[in-house]
Amino acid sequence: MEASLKALPLALEMARSGNPASASDAGVAALAALAAIRGAELNVRINASGLEDRAPAAPLLQRAKAILAEAMDLQDQVLEAVNKNIAL
């Protein structure tokens, strides 16, 4: 999750400042990163649900939820910048 989250600010910079002709590449990068994060968040939840001791699960679930929320916000920013580049 952490590694995929790091890709989103790069995609945002590319969408905002990169070659406008490659804006769609930045959008695809954001979509792929968010898909990876969503998948990882599902894995955290399923694995945490199997723990007998729920105490260690709480911070893991909280961190996964925070990463997902940040990633969704960044993806929205990337797609907004991409759409500005390809507006007709």
Image (spheres, grey):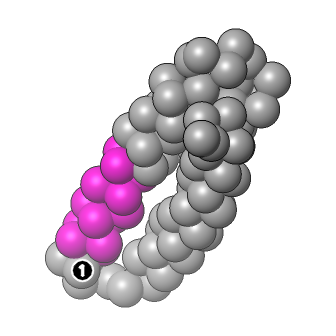
Residue 64 percent location from the top left of the image: 49, 65
Q: Is residue 57 left or right of residue 65?
A: left
Q: Please identify the quadrant where the C terminus is shown.
A: top right
**Crowd rating for badge 1 (residues with CA inside 10 Å; few <14, some 14–19, many 20+):** few
SS for dot 1: helix
Q: Extreme front residue here? A: 88
The residue under the point 62% across, 42% down is 87
Say which quarter of the image contains residue 28: top left
- Nearest the camera: 15 or 1? 15
Q: Is residue 16 left or right of residue 8?
A: right
Location of residue 59 with respect to 77 vertically, above or below: below
- Total labels: the figure holds 1
Residue 73 percent location from the top left of the image: 64, 62
Say which quarter of the image contains residue 20: top right
Res. 35 visible in picture: yes
| Residue underneath mark 1 | 49
- Nearest the camera: 35 or 1? 35
Location of residue 9 with respect to 34 vertically, above or below: above
Say which quarter of the image contains residue 71: bottom right
Residue 17 percent location from the top left of the image: 81, 23
The amino acid type of the residue labelled 1 equals Ser
Residue 45 among magenta residues: yes
Q: Extreme right residue here? A: 17
The residue under the point 51% across, 37% down is 27
- Nearest the camera: 84 or 66? 84
Q: Which residues are magenta?
A: 35-48
